[in-house]
Amino acid sequence: MATIGFIGLGNMGLPMAQNLLKAGHAVAGFDLGAKAKAAATEAGIDVADSIAAAVTGAEVVVTMLPAGPQVRAVYAGEAGVLATAAADALLIDCSTIDVETAREVAAMAAKSGRRMVDAPVSGGVGGAAAGTLTFMVGGSEASFAEAEPILAAMGRTIVHAGDAGTGQAAKICNNMMLGIQMISVCEAMALAEKLGLEQQKLFDISAKASGQCWSLTTYCPVPGPVPTSPANRDYQPGFTAAMMLKDLKLAQAAAQAVGAATPLGAEAAQLYALFALEGNEGLDFSAIMKMMRGRSG
């Protein structure tokens, strides 16, 4: 079992840290938010009063942070991870950030003599709580092999995507597909409604036909066909519209950086931006069905 410093104890980070604890690892955590600290303490996490205190002596450091600037600050700051963690600590960043920052921070870690992987996740808060996350991991073969048993305590599927930054590349490509697919399912459901076709009937047909996809069969955006989907609980989030918009923006920035054409990804980003501007950023991303239904009218 390992001694782990965990930075970022929010909606995703806390259940991930709890699963590490349940697996028998010793976990010390840190977060800037008072509510996050209180929740972590209640959950049995040893909460430190600084990054340095959380990572000093840790064999592994795991971070789960909002965006690239926070990752850069936590790792490269004056009292950050690279300045205070053990010289032989393994660094695992589970945040979803831009590929460029992931590669820059990995290069800083390598310069300091430490191993690092970028390991963004898919599965949302539910997957974090259940320990069923999918990890997309970028880094060397050796670093991946070392990180895999740590990640296995928090997830079910762990895939080595390639060198540094490829975990982030896989995450943003996957979520661009997801955003586009969700909008397509919502448009079809809204159209079926206007054409007098029951949504359950469309589900029953498309779930077994060429329109089948995860956004339909597992996360159906209308109440009824999939009882566990957020549509059945007023779109309380598993993965918010704001988080989807963030990932779609990351995908667009990456596409522009390498000159890739992603017209549907660009349109999905615009639609989610409009949906968020209408005050829906805290709803589940599947709640964009509300906007599609309104537009169909």
Image (tube, rainbow, N blue to C red):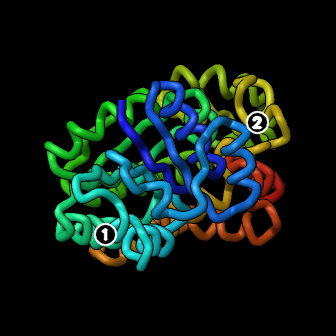
**Label pair 2/1, CB-CB below 8 angstroms:** no
Q: Amino acid at mark 2?
A: Val
Quadrant of res 246: bottom right
The correct choice, above or below, for 28 with respect to 206 in the image is below
The correct choice, above or below, for 162 with respect to 130 in the image is below
For marks 2 and 1, the one nearer the N-term is 1
The one nearer the camera, 96 or 228, is: 96
The tag on residue 226 is none
Residue on which the image places disc 2: 222
**The C terminus lies in which quarter of the figure?**
bottom right
- Residue at point 36%, 35% (across, down): 2
The one nearer the camera, 3 or 179, is: 3
- Residue at point 28%, 50% (across, down): 90
Looking at the image, residue 291 sits to the left or right of residue 108; the answer is right
**Element class at badge 2:** loop
- Say whether residue 252 is visible: no
Q: Position of residue 224 (x, y in %)?
A: 79, 25
**Element class at badge 1:** helix
Quadrant of res 84: bottom left
- Residue at point 46%, 63% (across, down): 52
Looking at the image, residue 235 sits to the left or right of residue 217; the answer is right
Q: Nearer the viewer, mark 2 or mark 1?
A: 1
The correct choice, above or below, for 207 with respect to 170 in the image is above
The correct choice, above or below, for 18 with respect to 175 in the image is above
Q: Residues within 10 Å of mark 1 (few under 14, many from 20)?
A: many
CA gap, disc 2 to disc 1? Answer: 41 Å
- Say whether residue 41 is visible: yes
Quadrant of res 215: top right
**The N terminus lies in which quarter of the figure?**
top left
Residue on which the image places disc 1: 105
Q: Residues within 10 Å of mark 2 (few under 14, many from 20)?
A: many
